[in-house]
Amino acid sequence: MTRVKGGFARHRKHVKVIKKAKGYYLTRSKNFKRANEAVVKAGEEAFAGRRIRRRDLRRVWISRINGALTEYGIPYSRFINKLKVANVTLDRKTLAEMVVNDSKAFKTLVKSL
């Protein structure tokens, strides 16, 4: 059986990883093994970071809604409960946008509950 070393396909894979690692420090941008480790680690961190960003945005939305509700003397939890009971399907992102951009609509929503 003949020996297969990979040749073109392996070189192409290495070049792809090295391109992704462009700008990394020292051998992390030049040596394939180190670059591959860095690229894989960066991908994992980016994946986790996207989850964390969603979590942080949700906290911001809740803070905005809660801040707007203090004007009406309604706690956030009671407001969300009233929305669910009234079968209003607006999510927190939309409610926060209403608070910032369309306060009149938000006011009518709060008064209607």
Image (cartoon, grey):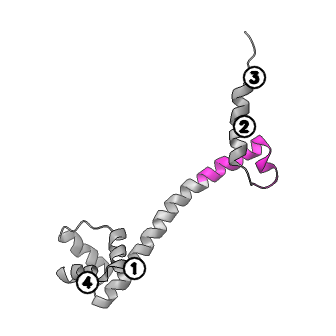
Provide the residue span drawn in magenta. Answer: 24-44
Mark earlier in primary sequence (2, 3)? 3
Q: What amino acid is labelled 2 in the image?
A: His
**Label number found at residue 88:** none
Mark earlier in primary sequence (4, 2)? 2
Mark 4 and mark 3 in contact (Cβ < 8 Å)?
Answer: no
> Residue 82 location, x and y as percent?
22, 75
Mark 2 and mark 1 in contact (Cβ < 8 Å)?
Answer: no
Q: Quadrant of the N terminus?
A: top right
Question: In this orientation, which residue lies closer to the viewer: 95 or 34?
Answer: 95
Q: Which residue is disc 4 drawn over?
A: 107
What distance separates the C-alpha of mark 4 from that of mark 1?
A: 14 Å
**Label number found at residue 14:** 2
Secondary structure of the residue carrying tag 2 is: helix
Q: Which residue is disc 1 drawn over?
A: 64
Mark earlier in primary sequence (3, 1)? 3
What distance separates the C-alpha of mark 2 from that of mark 3?
A: 14 Å
What distance separates the C-alpha of mark 1 from that of mark 2?
A: 47 Å
Mark earlier in primary sequence (3, 4)? 3
Q: Which residue is disc 3 drawn over?
A: 5
Asked whether, in this view, residue 105 is left or right of residue 34, the answer is left
